[in-house]
Image (spheres, rainbow, N blue to C red):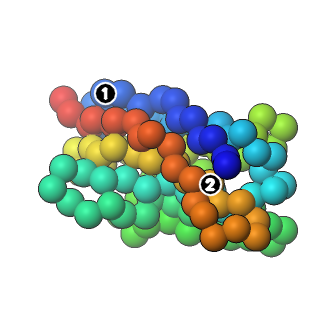
Amino acid sequence: QVQVVQSGGGLVQPGGSLNLSCVVSESLINLYSMGWYRQAPGKERELVARMILDVGGVTTYGASVEGRFTVSRDNAKNTATLQMNSLKAEDTAVYYCTAKPKGLSATYWGRGTQVTVSS
């Protein structure tokens, strides 16, 4: 079982920036992918970004965040970071980090962290 621990989030004004971090209990070289999803009240959960960690892997962003959000990873720290810029009110949601090990069908989820964009 992979533990996924999130940090960051909070309240930010429109146009501001926030970083979300995700630390996993497994080495990133043993993971197939890490991702971020979000769910706003009354809305379905949507993909924010998904990073394929295999060699040559690509990162996919949701259409609503493309060009504003960036994911990165630090293999030494077993960490993935979601950098969110130019935040909008509609980015308000609970954000979840996921980790999918290689060779397993299971995907492990963090507990979620609230991001609120408001003036």
In front of the other: 22 or 58: 22
Q: Residues within 10 Å of mark 2 (few under 14, many from 20)?
A: many
Which residue position holds label 1? 11
The residue under label 2 is 99
Question: Nearer the viewer's eye, disc 1 or disc 2?
Answer: 2
User: Front-most of 58 and 86?
Assistant: 58
Q: Secondary structure at mark 2?
A: strand
**Residue lying at 15% horizontally and 56% vertically, measured from the top left:** 42
Residue 14 position, x and y percent, is 27, 37
Location of residue 2 with respect to 107 vertically, above or below: above
Q: Residue, x 27% and y 44% (percent of image)?
A: 92
Image quadrant assignment for residue 59: bottom right
Which residue extends farthest left?
A: 42
- Residue in the image at 57% along x and 35% along y: 5
> In the image, 5: left or right of 69?
right
What separation in Å lies between label 1 and label 2 (alpha carbons)?
25 Å
In the image, is 106 to the left or to the right of 31?
left
| Residue 79: % across, % down | 69, 40
Q: Amino acid at mark 2?
A: Ala
**Residue 61 locus on image (x, y percent):** 50, 65
The answer to whether residue 84 is seen in the rendering is no
Q: Is residue 60 above or below residue 15?
A: below
Residue, x 57% and y 53% (percent of image)? 108
Q: Residue furthest front?
A: 1
Kind of element beneath mark 1: strand
